[in-house]
Image (cartoon, grey):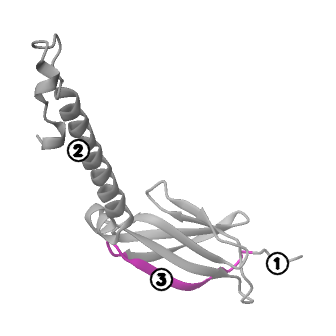
Amino acid sequence: MSLERSPSLDQFKDGMPDKLPDHKKQRNIRWVLMIAILVIGAGWGALTFLQSNAAAVMSGTGSISGSVTDENGKPVAAQIYVLGTNISGQALEDGSFSLEGVPAGQQTIAIAHQGSGFEVPAQIRSGENTLLGQVQYTSTLEPQQ
């Protein structure tokens, strides 16, 4: 206890007071502050970990990206699926796409547009982005009669 907070004899000239100062309240406040700091620190650490590449490596997932063009080299806004999973996405107007959380290992990527599609094999590495590059989508048009 610091000297500034120590009692003086003047406080006891009429005898012992009925209620002495309670230091438990201050101790409880310190404990609450320490626990709050620990919880905030743990939350910040967990958030940083989840946003880092380490979380993807430990969970065994990666990402895949590329672009889809038609036989004339024009961008195609196709649907992209990782077969055997619930992971899917849509290529943008410029044909580019990116899918996150793809399980590591050999995967089959399905590219679909206007009722037809095709499959592309891809090797996904944990914590890395697999670049498919430019994938050419060939439409299956029937000849006119």
Q: Residue furthest top?
A: 18
State if disc 2 and disc 1 touch (CB < 8 Å).
Answer: no
Could you tell whether 59 is left or right of 95 in the image? left
The kind of residue tagged 3 is Leu
State the image coordinates of residue 25 (x, y, percent, origin top left): 22, 28
State the image coordinates of residue 10 (x, y, percent, origin top left): 15, 25
Foreground: 16 or 10? 10
State the image coordinates of residue 27 (x, y, percent, origin top left): 18, 34
- Is residue 126 found inside the magenta-colored segment of the image? yes
State if disc 3 and disc 2 touch (CB < 8 Å).
Answer: no
Give the mark, 1 or 2, whose residue is nearer the N terminus: 2
Quarter of the rendering containing residue 59: bottom left
Q: Which mark is residue 131?
A: 3
The kind of residue tagged 1 is Pro
Q: Nearer the viewer, mark 2 or mark 3?
A: 2
Disc 1 secondary structure class: loop
What's the residue at 59%, 73% (across, down)?
Answer: 97
State the image coordinates of residue 53 (x, y, percent, origin top left): 34, 71
The kind of residue tagged 2 is Met
Distance, label 1 to label 2, CA atoms, is 75 Å
Give the mark, 2 or 3, whose residue is nearer the N terminus: 2
Could you tell whether 6 is left or right of 84 in the image? left
What's the residue at 64%, 79% (across, down)?
Answer: 68
- Residue placed under numbered mark 2 in the picture: 34
Asked if 120 appears above or below 115 in the picture, the reply is below
**Image: magenta residue range:** 124-140
Disc 3 secondary structure class: strand
Quarter of the rendering containing residue 45: bottom left
